[in-house]
Image (cartoon, rainbow, N blue to C red):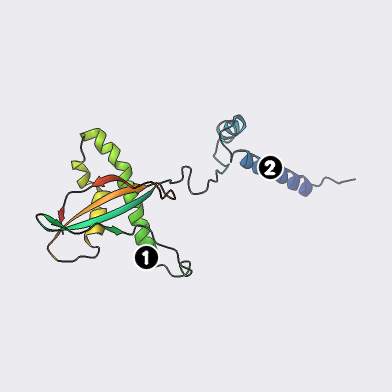
């Protein structure tokens, strides 16, 4: 016969609590069901049940492209050049990747700029005030310092989006800036 010592009771209680927590975690990882809703909003008062989603609750389905061109004269422009927002991973990226933070910052700022465009359109009806926003200024700074040809030129940038892995869709224009002197 099993002797119930205080240590055995303690271990049994902890095992039952951890097993229930594990089961509740598994049940709450799936789409909103009655069970997961009940556990998450009625039982889990202290938000102890984790929600593990890969790549975020709403993973990105679009790729953003940052392009720029220079104004040579009043009626002459260079071709559009794409500025890399992301980088190709190499075998050594896990060990040495000095550009990782710069690319991540630029990628996050571009996403912030894209997400702020609808609010500027609703408030003002146009995007003139967007030029004074922090994301716009950071993108303009990055674009103006990228492969400068001459000291006194004007540069314009464009944000476009494509449908990720679906290569048959053409990128659509999100934002076209005015020419800025750099």
In the displayed structure, would residue 93 be above or below residue 50? below
Q: In the image, 107: left or right of 26? A: left
Residue occupying the point 63% across, 42% down: 26
Q: For residue 85, what is the image quadrant?
A: bottom left
Residue under the point 17% across and 49% down: 178
> Label 2, on which residue?
17
**Residue 75 % position (x, y):** 11, 54
Which mark sits nearer the N-terminus, 1 or 2? 2
User: x and y percent of residue 21 in the render?
Assistant: 65, 42
**Nearer to the camera, 26 or 91:** 91
* Residues packed near mark 1 inside 10 Å, few (<14), some (14 to 19) or many (20 plus): few
Q: Residue at x 52, y 48 (%)?
A: 54
**Quadrant position of the N terminus in the picture:** top right
Q: Is residue 12 left or right of residue 24?
A: right
Quadrant for the C terminus in the image: bottom left
Question: With 39 as the anchor, is 86 left or right in this view?
Answer: left
């Amino acid at each position: 016969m099993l002797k119930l010592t205080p240590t055995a009771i303690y271990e049994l209680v902890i095992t039952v609590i951890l097993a229930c927590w594990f089961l509740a975690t598994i049940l709450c990882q799936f789409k909103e069901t009655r069970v997961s809703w009940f556990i998450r909003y009625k039982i889990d008062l202290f938000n102890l049940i984790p929600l593990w989603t890969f790549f975020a609750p709403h993973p990105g389905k679009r790729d953003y492209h940052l392009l720029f061109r220079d104004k040579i004269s009043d009626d002459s422009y260079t071709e559009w050049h794409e500025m890399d927002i992301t980088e190709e991973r190499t075998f050594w990226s896990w060990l040495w990747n000095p550009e990782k933070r710069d690319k991540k910052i630029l990628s996050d700022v571009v996403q912030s700029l894209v997400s702020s465009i609808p609010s500027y359109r609703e408030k003002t009806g146009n995007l003139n005030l967007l030029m004074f926003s922090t994301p716009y200024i950071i993108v303009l700074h990055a674009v103006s310092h990228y492969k400068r040809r001459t000291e006194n030129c004007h540069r314009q940038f464009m944000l476009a989006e494509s449908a990720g892995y679906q290569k048959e869709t053409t990128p659509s224009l999100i934002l076209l800036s005015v020419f800025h002197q750099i």
